[in-house]
Image: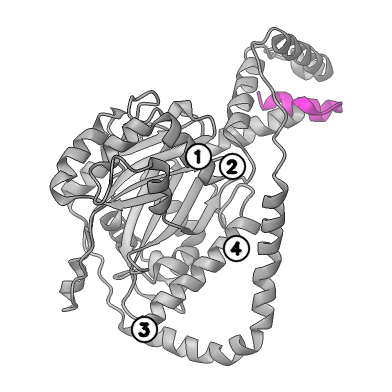
Amino acid sequence: MVVAPIVPEREPALRALLDTMNLLPGQADPANPLVPFGDFERLHFARFAVLADTTGADFGVFHLRRPAFPTYLAFLGECDGPAEAQLAAFADQAGEGLRRIFSHCAGFDPGRDLLTWMTAHQARTSAGYVNWIGRTVRQIRENSALRRALAAQVPRGGAAADDPQAARRALMAFVQQEQLQGRLLLTSPERTPFDWQWRNLLHAVGIPLAGLVLLPLIVVAAPFVLVALRRHEKCDPEYCPRPDSAAVRDMQRLEDHDLTNSFTALGLVKPGVFRRWLTQLLLLLIDYAARHVFGRGHLARVQTIHFARWVFLDGKARVLFASNYDGSHESYMDDFINKAAWGLNLIFSNGFGWPRTDWLVKGGARHELRFKHYQRRHQLPTQVWYKAYPGLTLTDLNRDQRIREGFEMASMNDEQARAWLRLL
């Protein structure tokens, strides 16, 4: 994620330039001349978003001093492998277009090395979620091609059910012939780098060990923290007015062009040291859970999110949340309310104006109308958004993965073969 402040008088020109990258409102042309996202084989999602201060005036409602923040340009994406390698590929293959875009940012020197500048302006992700750790763009595309090829050949009617083994052998032979002819590519998964496995293991063990070492201090501090939490919950401002109708329409104009949508939101952390420290601690725990508990198809009970991240900005005064999710915006919000309202409260209740909570996890997002007003007011338009596999939802990705796994099995019994054929 690259973040840089925009020169105020150049913001209109930047917005106009970003619009030229799209085929539809907010939907990137994969072959656009500025940043041809489709040329990058390891890139899942990418976006450009103008991060404007839309809710800073809320402080004034409670006679608090309104903080002043610049308007930023954010360039972020999700990729296979190291972020540094992806940035280097961007600089090498789309350097001219990126220079045109970043020339609207304060302090950008066209003569300076682009990769060095982007690296210097990276914003660290405090917590990140990946729906299925290790599933690459190449695997997704190959699995989808395999499913389409098999679905076009699978016997219809009762023939497959009567003799599933014969039907499967015929399909296997067909795919092998397609591979020989070069019309279908099925490569072996890449090996996970050893250094990544080692660092991941250290993280998985290190955080609980640190908690164990600090346990006596945690036990002593817990009552004081709980008392402070309840005191803050009872007096923190709640501010959830109805969002501006025109702003909502602008947001909706960018949505539902694909089965997947993007979500970008920015909000202020509640004033004071307590909330700032609490937010950092909770994001540390959320990042741990996302890496070691929820990396196999679900975040809590929500199964529609491809990727999500939380990023501190402005000296930890604000938090950016960005995600890629399946379905409509309304269903996305309902999914969280019904399945993970406690999780929303855990972190977002530290945001200024959030619906009032009890003991951090109760209330809050359970107040449906107030929550929906709050999140729409803090949502920002995503000016340019790219998805590497349009038309495919996580349900499709999981089904295609099961088809690939079934194809690679040496043998199946009749019931397994019937179940595999039904996936087609």
SS category of the residue bearing label 4: helix
Give the numbered dot on residue 86.
Answer: 1
The span shown in magenta is: 407-424
Spatial CA distance of label 4 from label 3 is 26 Å
Query: In the image, which is nearer the foreground, mark 1 or mark 4?
Result: 1
Asked if disc 1 and disc 4 are in contact, CB closer than 8 Å, the reply is: no
Q: CA distance from mark 2 to mark 1?
A: 8 Å
Q: Badge 3, how many Cα within 10 Å: few under 14, some, many 20+?
A: some
Q: Is residue 412 magenta?
A: yes
**Residue 64 point in image, percent of width and height:** 19, 78
- Label 1's element? helix
Q: Tell me the distance, in whole angstroms, between the alpha carbons under discs 2 and 4.
A: 19 Å
Q: Is residue 255 above or below residue 345?
A: above
Inspect this view and state whether residue 21 appears.
yes
The residue labelled by disc 3 is: 232
Q: Are marks 2 and 1 in contact (CB under 8 Å)?
A: yes
At label 1, the amino acid type is Gln
**In the image, residue 180 above or below residue 421:** above
At label 3, the amino acid type is His
- Label 2 or label 3, whichever comes before in sequence order: 2
Q: What residue is drawn where x is 38% and y is 23%? A: 31
Residue that appears at 64% across and 77% down: 211
The disc labelled 2 sits on which kind of residue?
Gly
Q: Is 134 colored magenta in this rendering? A: no
As drawn, the label of residue 288 is: 4
Say which residue label 2 marks.
Answer: 81
Answer with mark 4 or mark 3, whichever residue precedes in sequence.
Answer: 3
Query: Going from the N terminus, do you reach mark 2 or mark 4 first?
Result: 2
User: Mainly helix, strand or loop, the magenta region?
Assistant: helix
Q: CA distance from mark 2 to mark 3?
A: 41 Å
